[in-house]
Image (spheres, rainbow, N blue to C red):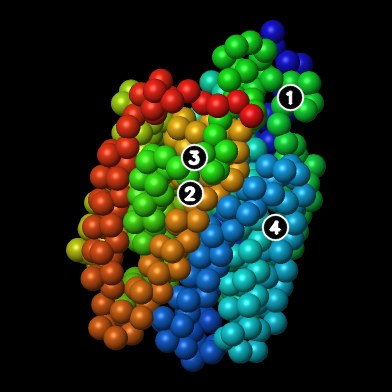
């Protein structure tokens, strides 16, 4: 029987908006890179550390925020997080020293997205079973759309009003998103007399939040740690383009505007990849498709390290974005395949904590290596090698179906 006025798609819409605006504010950092460097007379490593602080925080806070949302529901956790992102943007706009930007943008945006990301994505998993892949793909496509829209918007605001006013306007947009999240991100369907996918029946019932491992149970398994190490390895190179692609392009004699265009191409690729690879996952299984995303990001990084050509850089940005988008779209569903949805927020948060090390180290290493050696190539190649190693870890895990057959999901 079909539920009347199924609410799950509103949860998808709320998550899409949160990820679009939250990660849009994060990933438009490339547009602020050179203005901040000029304003404070800083080295590239010092400016890179601003983004690294934010990235390290928002992934490391996935575990406590996911566990909190499992207990109290996602709506106020996510809305509070988006309000902190706005506060961070407002604080950065008033900076008179570089450390003020670390505290405002780095800590504010980092903690805010850390509270918003995992709880919003986990909420979608509970509202869907058979349509989980589609729903997750639509929701996390917000990251790609934010990456398309925010860098050109930020660049236009910087050009017309200056970087300080640009941060103010980004803060205003984020506050509006916090209000929308508070109204849309309801906890799980059974609390509102509905069923996953909007349909009653055994297939939908499997997705109820009382089925699956606790975090402690999941953490005692080999697949948990193989997936954890894989994400950590892949993350080293995953965020370097979002920080350094604009200065890389300037060093090659191309315009800053072209660099911002490449960031938007990352977003276009990311948005397309979240849906384009859904068919691959259906044909070969989510585990193998997930590993293919890691191989793809590694191959794209090798292309980047080998060229300064205008068209090849555009190919790199589009392909890298597509594989990054596929990685983000598949990760929650792969984790749910192994561990169920009972404590998905906490498990997903613990997995994403592994990404925090890469988000912190990768862009920072790239900045300081450029300051010392005058080149990004070595760091980019290292990122590619780690992505390939991550793919190996994923393929070393038992297939989810085999794992579940040998170890049925426990009930609460």
Of the two numbered discs 4 and 2 on the same chain, state the one appearing first in sequence.
4
Of the two numbered discs 3 and 4 on the same chain, state the one appearing first in sequence.
4
Determine which residue is flagged by label 4.
81
In three-dimensional space, the C-alpha distance between marks 3 and 2, rounded to whole angstroms, equals 11 Å
- Secondary structure under tag 2 reads helix
In three-dimensional space, the C-alpha distance between marks 3 and 1, rounded to whole angstroms, equals 24 Å
Q: Vertically, is 295 above or below 238?
A: above
Residue 335 in percent (x, y) is at: 47, 37
How crowded is the residue under tag 4: few (<14 C-alpha within 10 Å), some, or many (20+)?
A: many
Determine which residue is flagged by label 2.
351
Q: Vertically, is 28 above or below 339?
A: below
Residue 6 in percent (x, y) is at: 72, 22
In three-dimensional space, the C-alpha distance between marks 4 and 1, rounded to whole angstroms, equals 25 Å
The quarter of the image holding the C terminus is: top right
Residue 400, picture quadrant: top left
Determine which residue is flagged by label 3.
218
Q: Which of 307 and 95 is in front in this view?
A: 95
Residue lying farthest to the left in this orientation? 306
- Secondary structure under tag 1 reads helix
Residue 355, picture quadrant: bottom left
In three-dimensional space, the C-alpha distance between marks 3 and 4, rounded to whole angstroms, equals 27 Å
Residue plotted at (37% across, 41% down): 222
Which circle, 3 or 2, is nearer the viewer? 3
Residue plotted at (63% across, 54% down): 64
How crowded is the residue under tag 3: few (<14 C-alpha within 10 Å), some, or many (20+)?
A: some
């Amino acid at each position: 029987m079909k539920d009347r006025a199924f609410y799950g798609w509103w949860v998808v819409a709320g998550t899409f908006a949160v990820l679009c605006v939250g990660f849009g504010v994060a990933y438009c950092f490339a547009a602020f890179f050179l203005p901040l460097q000029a304003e404070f007379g800083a080295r590239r490593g010092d400016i890179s550390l601003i983004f690294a602080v934010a990235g390290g925080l928002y992934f490391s806070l996935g575990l406590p925020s996911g566990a909190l949302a499992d207990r109290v529901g996602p709506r106020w956790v996510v809305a509070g997080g988006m309000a902190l992102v706005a506060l961070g943007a407002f604080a950065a706009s008033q900076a008179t020293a570089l450390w003020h930007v670390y505290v405002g943008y780095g800590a504010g945006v980092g903690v805010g997205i850390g509270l918003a990301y995992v709880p919003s994505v986990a909420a979608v998993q509970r509202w869907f079973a058979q349509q989980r892949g589609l729903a997750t793909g639509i929701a996390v496509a917000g990251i790609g759309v934010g990456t398309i829209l925010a860098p050109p918007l930020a660049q236009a605001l910087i050009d017309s009003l200056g970087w300080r006013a640009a941060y103010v306007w980004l803060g205003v947009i984020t506050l509006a998103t916090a209000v929308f999240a508070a109204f849309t991100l309801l906890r799980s369907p059974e609390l509102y007399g509905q069923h996953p996918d909007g349909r009653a029946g055994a297939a939908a019932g499997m997705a109820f939040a009382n089925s699956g491992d606790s975090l402690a149970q999941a953490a005692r398994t080999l697949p948990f740690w193989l997936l954890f190490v894989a994400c950590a390895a892949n993350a080293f190179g995953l965020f370097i383009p979002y920080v350094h692609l604009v200065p890389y392009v300037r060093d090659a004699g191309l315009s800053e505007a072209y660099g911002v265009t490449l960031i938007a191409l990352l977003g276009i690729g990311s948005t397309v990849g979240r849906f384009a690879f859904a068919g691959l996952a259906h044909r070969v299984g989510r585990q193998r498709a997930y590993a293919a995303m890691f191989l793809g990001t590694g191959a794209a990084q090798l292309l980047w390290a080998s060229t300064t050509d205008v068209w090849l850089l555009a190919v790199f940005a589009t392909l890298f974005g597509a594989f990054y988008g596929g990685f983000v779209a598949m990760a929650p569903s792969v984790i749910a395949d192994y561990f169920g949805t009972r404590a998905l927020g906490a498990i997903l948060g613990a997995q994403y904590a592994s990404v925090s090390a890469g988000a912190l180290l990768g862009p920072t290493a790239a900045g300081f290596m450029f300051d010392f050696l005058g080149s990004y190539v070595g760091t980019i190649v290292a990122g590619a090698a780690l992505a390939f190693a991550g793919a190996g870890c994923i393929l070393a895990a038992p297939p989810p179906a085999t794992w579940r057959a040998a170890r049925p999901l426990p009930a609460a």
